Amino acid sequence: MDPLRRALLRLLVPALCLLAAAAGCAAPAPPADGQVRRAVADWAAAPPARLAGIPLEGWAYEVTSVRRDGARAFARAELRYRLAGYDTAPAGSARELELARDPGGAAWRVTADRPAPGAPPQLWDQGEVAVVRGAHSLVLGVGQSPQTLSGLAAEADRAVPAVSAAWPRPWAGRVVVLVPGTLDAMAALLGRPADTYRGMGAVTTGATGAGPAPADRVVVNPEGYAQLSQAGRQIVLTHETTHVATRTATTARTPQWLSEGFADWAAYREGPLGPAQAAPTLARAVRLGDLPAALPDDGAFAFGGDQEAMARAYEGAWLACRLVAARWGDAALVRLYEGAGRAPLPTALGQALGTDRDALTKAWQEALRTELG
């Protein structure tokens, strides 16, 4: 090539590159990114041994970004998985995978798999998971004795048919129970401060205020649950399982007094406790002349608030649902629940009970005077 042509090429090549950039041309992704993604896919094909006892299926990572730092790489990904026989849709979890180059430098391998910054952990991030299968339940625990997990499975197995009797609509008929090692570990799973759940026996992911809801799980507070009597534990498990069963009928329209009251109604309906025994906080208030002026509003059920006010709200909600079932029938209460998830409450009350909110409130107040006063 003659000197003049070489000089022209030296001038033209940078100019052509600038024109390509101005036209929006992008360079192809560096090959290493593809290698990192392949390494993540290989990792997904053989989950860690510590997960071997968990009935996982559909385990896959969708890599959203890759950042390289010399001989290390960091991949952000969305983990998708199902618990075989329990989940009808994939659960999700934001993850960060750390990778290192093999000594030869030709390939990458995953060296760590952890929650993405700001994302809550999974139960297996907190330690080795023990698995107990019940007839209608799957119990996953960390740092718990086999006896504790087996007892929870038995309680969950009793809860499922009790819920099916109260909610005669199609649902999975099974429940997944997570049992972390401590209250702090429970709060971490749900992404909330520990004080939010102090004193509670359990919550259900997906229930308002309970935390993120990749799939319905009953999450036990091991400290609060251990303080309950046998009857109390059964009531808690049945209440939370009711939330799992009614999830498809529950929407943002559903009032909290109906959602929580129905769950308590399902838990107490076959038990021996009467109103004064099961609603002691509200009973004290009514005896002192503090009769609620209205059905509890949604804010009264917020976690981490005034515990006594929240107890009165739960007890009042239960007694409202108990009243509906006693006066209009169990089937009418179920129809009210379904209707309130689809239409405004006044419409649902009219269609299911043939009444309005004012009339229901007055009947509820009279029941409180009679049964608690």
Image (cartoon, helix red, strand yellow):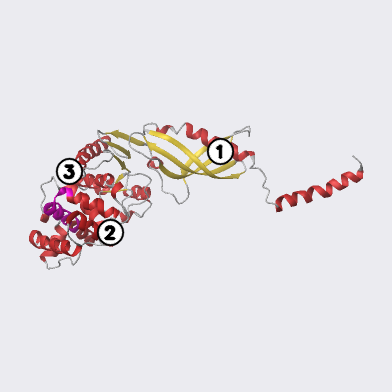
* Front tag of 3 and 2: 2
Examine the structure image and report whether residue 326 is included in the region drawn in magenta. Answer: yes
Report x, y in % for residue 268. Answer: 16, 48
In the image: residue 283, left or right of residue 202: left
The answer to whether residue 286 shows anywhere in this view is yes
Q: Quadrant of the N terminus?
A: top right
In the image: residue 97, left or right of residue 180: right
- Quarter of the image for residue 357 reads bottom left
Report x, y in % for residue 59. Answer: 44, 36
The reply to whether callout 2 and callout 1 are in contact (CB within 8 Å) is no
Q: Give, as a three-letter code, the residue at label 1.
A: Arg
Q: Which residues are magenta?
A: 316-331
Q: Please tell me whether residue 55 is drawn above or below residue 166 in the rendered image.
A: above
Q: Please tell me whether residue 99 is drawn above or below residue 251 in the rendered image.
A: above
Q: Give, as a three-letter code, the residue at label 3.
A: Gln
In the image: residue 270, left or right of residue 36: left
Look at the numbered disc 1 and give the secondary structure of its residue. Answer: helix
| Nearer to us in this view, 33 or 172 | 172
- Please name the residue that numbered disc 1 is placed on: 37
The answer to whether residue 199 shows anywhere in this view is no
- Please name the residue that numbered disc 2 is placed on: 344
| Nearer to us in this view, 125 or 358 | 358
Examine the structure image and report whether residue 163 is included in the region drawn in magenta. Answer: no
Query: Which circle's residue, 2 or 1, is located before the other in the chain?
Result: 1
- Quarter of the image for residue 34 reads top right
Q: Please tell me whether residue 85 is drawn above or below residue 64 in the rendered image.
A: above
